[in-house]
Each structure stands twice: as C-alpha cells, then as structure tokens.
Image: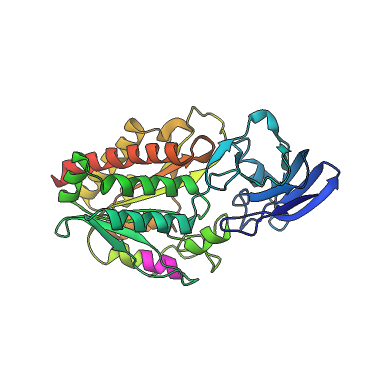
Amino acid sequence: MVKFSSDFECGNGKNFQQISSDRFRCQVKGDKKVYCYYFCFDVISSEKKDITIEVWHDPDINDPDGFISHFPTTIWVSKDGRRFLPLDKSYCKCFDDHIEISLFLMPEQKIRVTNNWVCSYSDTCDFINKIVKERKNCEFFVPGKSFGNRDIMGIRTGNTNKPVVMCIAGQHPVEFPGIWAVRAVIDFITSSLPEAKELRNDFLFEIIPIVNPDGNVAGRNCFTDEGIDLYQVFGENPFAAQPPSKEGELLWNLATSRPLCLWINFHCYLGWRANSEYPYDGWYQVPYDVFSDTRQKTIYQALCDTLRLQTDAPSTWIEPEIHWKNSFEYQLALRYNIPHVFYEINGGTAGPFQSGKRGLKVFTMAMKTLKHFYG
C-alpha cells in the first residue's frame, strides 16, 4: 500500500488517488492564476516499489499555463524533511497541464517530495532564537502579529542613531529561497566579520524573514489567511491611505513611521525561463521618475545599477520587470521617496546555500552602494 499526506507545516497537495498499481495522481492547491504551482507531500509504501506520481494544476484555479510555466525545475526529495537532494532530471517529465515524477520506494521509508526546498516558519523562529541567544549584538524584533495570531518575528541590530534599513521576505509564503536569503543576511549582519561590524556602526537594521507566517505554515502559494496578496498589497486601490490587510498595514506603518533609507525585499520563482542564463534570477524596478526627490532618485539609480552590474539579476532577462502600482515598492517610492532593492532568486537553482550566497551578494553590494551616500 502507498500512502500520501500533505498535512504538515508547509505541506501542499490534494485529491491524492491511485490510478493503477504503480501510478498515482494529485493536484496542487493554488491561490490564484500563476500562483498555483507549489507542492510538498510525503509518500510512503509498505513494500519496495517503483511508482509514478502525476502532479496536476489546481482545477479550482484552472490555470494550467500558469502552473506549467514553473516547469521544468528541480524536484527535491528528502528522507528526513530537512535535508533535500535534487531528483535526477530523467525522473521528471513535463506535459501541457501536469508533470510526472518517478520514484523508487523502499519499505516503510517516508519520502518528502517538493519543487521548492522548504524553509518553515517554526524552523526560522528557532533560527532567530538561536542567533539572539548566542550573539549579543542584536535583539528580537517583533512588530506585531499576523491575522492568524502568529508573531511576525525578526531581529534588530546596529546603531539606533543611524539610518534604518529594512529587509524582508516571505510575502508570497512558499517562495523559500527569499527566506533562506534573508536568514543568511541575519547571520552575516550579526557576525564578527569586520564588514558586518562596520555596517552595524553605520546603520540600524530591522530584518524579517517571514512577513506572512500564516501562509508559510499552510503551504499557500500566495495569500495570507485573509486571502491577500502581500506583494499587490494595496489591492484594487493603489492610492489608498493604508493597505487593506493586517500584515500589510503593519508593514506599511513600520516602513513609514520614521525615516527609512532602504527597503530590501527578496522573492523567488521557479523554472528554466526563455532567454535565460544560469542561475536564472531576476529583479524589479519602478521608473526613476516616480521619485520626486533628486537625491533619493540618484540613490535609487545607483542601486539599480548595482543590481544590473554586480549581481545575477539580469540572468533571466537583461531588463528588469516593472513593479505594480499597488506594491509597497511603488508606493514607498512615490509617497516617501524610499528606494528599494527587489530581487528574485530562482528556486530551481537554489536551496539554502545558493539562496544565501546570492542573497548576501545582493545585500552586501547594495549596502556598499548605499554607504557611498551615507558615509
């Protein structure tokens, strides 16, 4: 007998069924078009067995093109739910509306299967607790609770008399490479490295790896518990006074309650894209003219040059994507002249190490540029 389950933190998968003796089928549980691709489930067999699992798009969303646009990508498998290994590409086939994964199962050995190396809320809270306990140069930073009453947990470190830098991830809850990247930033900025010490002297850092903990725990592709996309945080009214969600309002108030010199946001997508070169990362910008302050516009232009020339951002395409007007980034630039760095790590080429490595490159290059203006 073969059993499936997605009933665990960050799990995703529904309607598991057996088609034949060695063929099974399930569907992802999506949130909206395009954001309907993530799966993470356990499979266990009572006997040694070769099986094939068909993973289909979510019929409730009915966006097979959005689903399949994230494939082919790395399929990760784990025996303990923590350390994942990439499945050989020959064991995964892509079709117009589903993919097929082939596995060899040993008796009573549980295998976790996913298309994005998981970085869970509970593990991230443990990570933050460990950092704060072991290092005396930082403190817990919990600006509030989520709609589901979970702590939105981060760290604060640096000089309270200096300009503030915010760094976040996890708006889209299963974009785990962004979370891994921000965890690496936390590790770096609280470390004993001379560069980190110098940055702590010159800036105050407020860093939150998971701003949507409810979605992370539930394994949601996009939404909060309120059904809100925290990237398009202002929804249908980009020029509203406040975002219409608990997490959105909290982050907006945090970003605008005192002068903020930089907003850094990490996201993720999957798959080998057209017109791409390894590692298939990307980035977003707003038009420079969104800024009304000449100095802030100059800083922002320099940060955009940094991403284009000193990171892997152009490896998916040589031009950035343009932010939606209902995003934090657009409205912070328009209303408060706050510059940002918005970077997309490709989860098909990044687990914890590569996500951290690329995230740190983005962070350190951006801070090097910023220091030129605040030195």
Lateral position of residue 159 relative to residue 107, left or right:
left
Image quadrant of residue 170?
bottom left
Residue 98 forms part of the magenta stretch? no
Reply above or below: 51 against 128.
above
Residue displayed at 56% across by 36% down: 85
| Number of numbered tags placed on the structure image | 0
Q: Is residue 345 left or right of residue 191?
A: right
| 176 lies above or below 122 | above
Q: Quadrant of residue 142?
A: bottom left
**Residue drawn at (49%, 27%), measured in percent from left and top?**
277
Q: Residue 366: x and y, percent?
A: 28, 41
Residue furthest to the right: 20
Q: Is residue 102 visible?
A: no
Q: How is the image coloured?
A: rainbow
Q: Is residue 278 above or below residue 286?
A: above
Residue 117 visible from this viewpoint: yes
In-front residue for pair 368/284? 368
Which quadrant of the figure has residue 220? bottom right
x and y percentages locating residue 198 in the rendered image: 16, 44
Q: Quadrant of the C terminus?
A: top left
* x 29%, y 64%: residue: 256
**Main SS category, magenta section:** helix
Q: Residue at x 26, y 39 (%)?
A: 302
In the rendered view, would you say 368 is above or below 35?
above
The stretch of residues the image draws in magenta is: 243-251
Estimate the x, y position of residue 64 in percent, counting from the top left: 70, 46
In front of the other: 92 or 234: 92
Membership of 248 in magenta stretch = yes
Name the spot of residue 223 as percent of width and height, x first: 54, 61
| Left or right: 62 as drawn, with respect to 204 | right
